Amino acid sequence: MEEPVFESVRYSAPCEDCGAQLERWGVHGLIGGSLRWDVESMCSACGQTTADCGQALPYRLRDRLLTDHGPATLHVADPSVERVTLMRVLRAELGIGLTDAKAVLGQVLAGAYSGTLPDVEYLARKLRRAGVDAVATRP
């Protein structure tokens, strides 16, 4: 079984009930082959607590993770790898069409495809399962 991959971020936001500043914790992870995220918060002024989670990472949380940790980059060891295999995995895992997959393929082959570490590691694992030597790295 592959190791889970996590990134977390702590930030302040206004309380939805009283407006006071509260502390939030956001986590994005690759666990057991699935991407998950969650955000928890508690207001010290009014005691309001929230917990939210899901699979599709909200843009606000993604932006905070990328700001705090920096992007991870997907690298393919052999650029002459079967492009058909790469395209098939990219289309299936990213849910994109042929035109977008060609653009993403160009980014992957140039070492320019990036995102949060859990997102990029997820794609790297899918590519490795398809026989492509791929890794997620952080500069």
Image (tube, rainbow, N blue to C red):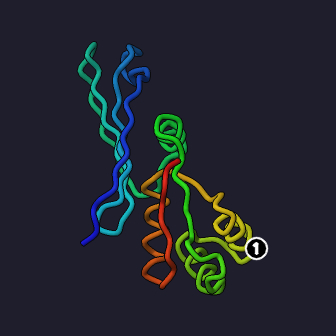
Residue 68 percent location from the top left of the image: 47, 34
Figure check: 81 above or below 72: below
Using the rendered view, name the quadrant where residue 99 is placed. Answer: bottom right
Question: For the residue marked with disc 1, what is the amino acid?
Answer: Thr
Question: Which is nearer the eye, 126 or 93?
Answer: 126
* Quadrant where the image shows the N terminus: bottom left
Residue 103 percent location from the top left of the image: 73, 67
Identify the secondary structure beneath mark 1: helix
- Classify mark 1: residues with Cα within 10 Å, few (<14), some (14-19) or many (20+): few
Query: What residue sits right under mark 1 in the picture?
Result: 99
For image coordinates 38% across by 54% down, the residue present is 54
Query: Is 95 left, or right, of 50 in this rendering?
Result: right
Q: How many numbered discs?
A: 1
Residue 119 percent location from the top left of the image: 47, 58
Figure check: 126 above or below 24: below
Question: Which is nearer the eye, 13 or 120?
Answer: 120
For image coordinates 49% across by 50% down, the residue present is 138
For image coordinates 39% across by 16% down, the residue present is 21
Figure check: 58 above or below 125: above
Using the rendered view, name the quadrant where residue 79 is placed. Answer: bottom right
Figure check: 123 above or below 42: below
For image coordinates 36% across by 21% down, the residue present is 17
